[in-house]
Amino acid sequence: MITVKDLHKKFGSNEVLKGIDCHVDEQEVVCLIGPSGSGKSTFLRCLNGLETATSGAIEVNGHTITDKKTNVNVVRQQVGMVFQHFNLFPHLKVVDNVMLAPVKVGRLSKDEARSKAAALLDKVGLADKTNAYPGSLSGGQQQRVAIARALAMNPAVMLFDEPTSALDPEIVGEVLAVMKDLAREGMTMVVVTHEMGFAREVGDRAVFMDGGVIVEQGPPSQVFGDPQHTRTQNFLSKVL
Amino acid sequence: MLRSFNWLDVESLLRGAVWTIVLCVTAGIAGTVLGLLLGIASSSPSRIARWVASTYVLIIRGIPLLVIVFFAYFGIPLMFPDIDLSAFLTAVIALTVFATAYMAEIFRGSINAVPRGQTEAAQALGLNYGRRLRFVVLPQALRIAVPPGIGFLIALIKDSSLVTVIGFVELTRSGTTISNLTAEPIITYSVVAVLYFVICYGVSRLGNWYENRSGPRRERPEPENQSAALQLEGV
């Protein structure tokens, strides 16, 4: 589903990613963990072209997005993304947030898109907020709308960039529950997270990044239970 | 042959006020449309578009409106000798050229004030540049542009009095004529001032109405969450 080869990313002279090789299978849930500044968010953002790779190759769902000839917007339609700060469109109602891409890009009719949006909002438990504006929702509700919006294009992969980091602790659970459902349904997911419990329980693989490289990866039980590298051990001892 | 200030004078001042309104509405609309295009250009990915926009703004903002008015008055007949431009159209062109530069900066600032996350979310959904602009960025930017835009239009209404120098009879020009005829400058200019005030007040109210027109659109501030702040990534 996703294949990354020797990915480097520099911001000016600051090399944030120093050669990442990674493969994500279909239906796999990969959790990226690591300290702040380790490059995990940058890595995730390279996967849908929000950041342009300095060198290396990224293939997502059969498209090589590091190839200049690839239309990145076509790839992005197959890759859903959920942001730390939700980034809902404040001038649009909840339902219009979800419908925007299917109508303007996906060529669904308004009626088709509306019923699809209704189904997705129902799925994330927000059928009653259809006509609300994002500003009137809680953070957890906004993030669930954001997930519904990303799902509206039937993506093959979902990318989550610290989806619960901006939420109050008591509402983190409602967002994680939606993500668990998605994983159970077989969605391919790459999740940058500080929720170690989620990574351990839902993830098929945990990838520990530090200093722009993948230090260690494997089944969560192994990475969390028996970390091999001292950097992983240090990090886990601080966050667990 | 002095005569006293009477109701007929008020009537001709009102006529002048109508011309001021017509002039400013025309130049205001033209300047807003052209300014929006330049504002989009100056925030666009195209370097050439950005250069054209910023150069225009740089030049026009550095020239006094009065000089622009003179340029229009003397320059256009030189460049296009066949066209007989009325004083009104000359005034409209001068004010439009002037307003475009300022509106362009207002729109550029408003577009840039739309949070980066909005563009990224639209990008992540696969919207191309034009669609991002049309459906996500501009609707939010236009709302941000209203207060400074209205402020500038009010300034434009008052600055429009400068076109008296080319003989276009608008509010200030009517006032000058009547003041000379009646030798009652205080009364005359008081009426002129009141009329300017009424026009500007109307524009202010229009702006307030537009801002309050529709429901809750402001995004609530980000949830204050200390752990979130600590976890914010540097890159």
Image (cartoon, grey):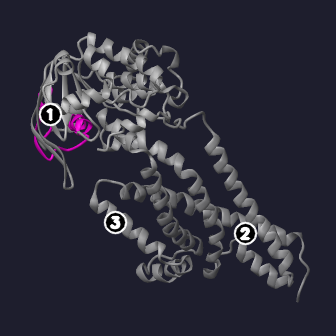
Which residue is labeled 1 in the image? A214
Q: Secondary structure at mark 3?
A: helix
Which residue is labeled 2 in the image? B16
Residue A62: x, y in percent? 11, 27
Q: Chain of mark 2?
A: B
Which residue is labeled 3 in the image? B52
Which callout, 3 or 2, points to the residue nearer the camera? Answer: 3
Instruction: Tell me the CA gap for discs 3 and 2.
Output: 37 Å
Q: Secondary structure at mark 1?
A: strand
Residue A85: x, y in percent? 41, 34
Label placed on residue A19 = none
Q: Residue furthest bottom?
A: B1
Q: Chain of mark 1?
A: A
Which callout, 1 or 3, points to the residue nearer the camera? Answer: 1
The magenta span reads: A39-66
Q: Secondary structure at mark 2?
A: helix
Q: Quadrant of residue B218?
A: top right
